[in-house]
Image: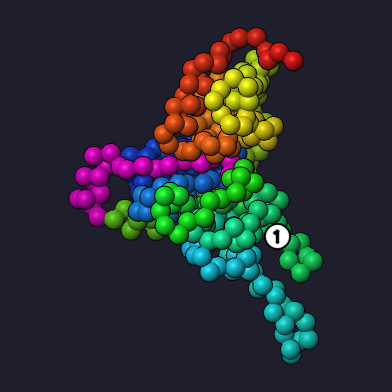
């Protein structure tokens, strides 16, 4: 199973060159049962990552381009009246898929953004008084442009919290960029990517991730990290219990991808920047927040005593 996960990372790396760490984070996010937010400039490979991930996992894939005039019904679906049958017929929206790419999610209004909240949290949508379950697994990869760009709407904190991770791809390395220039657009290779994990295997892997061991000392270290965000560091607000659980779940998935059945402090440290930054008021993906998180990881002792009550 772990070799299949590594093979999936290698396959995605064929079209997203030089981004091994980001690819591993994206796959970790899926295995942990969360959703992924990618913030970057247009043309950095956000859509390529989403499409390639769905391809190597053999999952159904839908892409929605968010615009300022989009309505919630454009995402979750709508019921229309069938005069011949004298009843309403529900037409599912693109949210009824396994991998949903919500492209440029912050270019639509908050009302439309909120249409995804129930789907992401409860794996279902409610419309016309009826609750409809979503296909499994259900994984949202949302992309957003920097807020400095025109025509963007900030995501509310309640929706940001539904994303297990927020990452940024960044510019390619000079070596990777030379390969792109010589070989053309890597996206053309997506149809030729091999499926590395079946649906049944993916469900089993996610179950194995949930059962990974976290020792008492590891939990104590996690508590110290969370306590520091709340009381000892420069964050406006600290991590909530849900945010702390997200950090633990992500660390378990990272440990699994690394080939271990137990979690070590380095796993928490590896996923902390992607899990913490967007959950703390005033913390952005780049710049001062990243330095703040680096200081957090450096200042909190891995083997110190438990948090005082």
Specify the color scheme.
Answer: rainbow
In percent of the image, x 33 and y 39: which residue is there?
A: 18
Task: State the residue in front, 39 or 85.
Answer: 39
Residue at the limit of the structure toward the bottom, as seen here: 84
Residue 180 lies in the magenta-colored region:
yes
State the count of labels. 1
Q: Residues within 10 Å of mark 1 (few under 14, many from 20)?
A: many
Horizontal side of residue 304 vs 106, given as left or right? right
Q: For the residue labelled by badge 1, is the local secondary structure a helix, a strand or a loop?
A: strand
With respect to residue 184, does 88 lie above or below? below
Between 205 and 210, the one nearer to me in the picture: 210
Q: Is residue 141 left or right of residue 241?
A: left
Where in the figure is residue 230, as x and y percent of width and height? 63, 25
- Left or right of 1? Residue 88 is right
Quarter of the picture containing the N terminus is top right
Residue 290 point in image, percent of width and height: 45, 31
255 or 303: which is nearer to us?
Answer: 303
Q: Is residue 96 left or right of residue 89?
A: left
Q: Looking at the image, which residue is at 62% across and 32% down?
A: 237
Instruction: Return the residue at label 1.
Output: 125
Which region shows up in magenta? Answer: 162-184
279 inside magenta stretch: no
Q: Quadrant of the C terminus?
A: top right
Picture coordinates of residue 76 (x, y %)? 64, 65
- Examine the rendering and report whether any part of residue 219 can be seen: yes
Q: Residue at the spot x=55%, y=33% of the render?
A: 276
Residue 222 against residue 2 in the figure, above or below: above
Q: Quadrant of residue 211?
A: top right
Residue at x 68%, y 15% (from the top left corner): 307
Q: Where's residue 72, x and y in %?
A: 62, 65
């Amino acid at each position: 199973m772990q070799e299949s996960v590594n093979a999936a990372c290698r396959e995605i790396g064929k079209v997203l060159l030089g981004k091994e760490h980001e690819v591993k984070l994206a796959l970790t996010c899926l295995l942990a049962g969360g959703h992924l937010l990618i913030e970057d400039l247009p043309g950095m490979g956000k859509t390529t990552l989403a499409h390639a991930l769905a391809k190597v996992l053999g999952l159904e894939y839908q892409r929605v381009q968010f615009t300022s005039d989009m309505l919630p019904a454009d995402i979750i679906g709508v019921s229309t009246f069938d005069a011949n049958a004298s009843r309403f017929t529900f037409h599912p929206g693109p949210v009824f898929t396994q991998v949903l790419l919500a492209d440029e999610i912050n270019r639509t209004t908050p009302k439309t953004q909120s249409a995804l909240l129930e789907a992401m949290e409860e794996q279902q949508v409610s419309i016309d008084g009826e609750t409809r379950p979503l296909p499994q697994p259900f994984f949202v990869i949302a992309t957003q442009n920097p807020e400095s760009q025109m025509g963007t709407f900030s995501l509310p904190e309640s929706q940001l919290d539904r994303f297990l991770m927020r990452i940024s791809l960044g510019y390619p390395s000079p070596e990777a960029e030379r390969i792109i220039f010589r070989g053309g657009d890597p996206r053309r290779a997506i149809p030729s990517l091999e499926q590395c994990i079946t649906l049944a295997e993916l469900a089993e892997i996610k179950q194995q991730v949930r059962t990974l061991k976290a020792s008492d000392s590891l939990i104590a270290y996690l508590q110290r990290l969370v306590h520091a965000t709340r009381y000892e560091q420069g964050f406006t607000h600290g991590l909530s219990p849900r945010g702390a659980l997200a950090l633990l779940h992500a660390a378990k998935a990272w440990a699994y991808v690394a080939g271990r059945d137990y979690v070590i402090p380095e796993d928490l440290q590896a996923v902390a920047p992607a899990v913490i930054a967007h959950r703390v008021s005033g913390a952005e993906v780049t710049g001062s927040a990243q330095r703040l998180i680096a200081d957090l990881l450096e200042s909190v002792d891995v083997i110190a005593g438990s948090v005082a009550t």
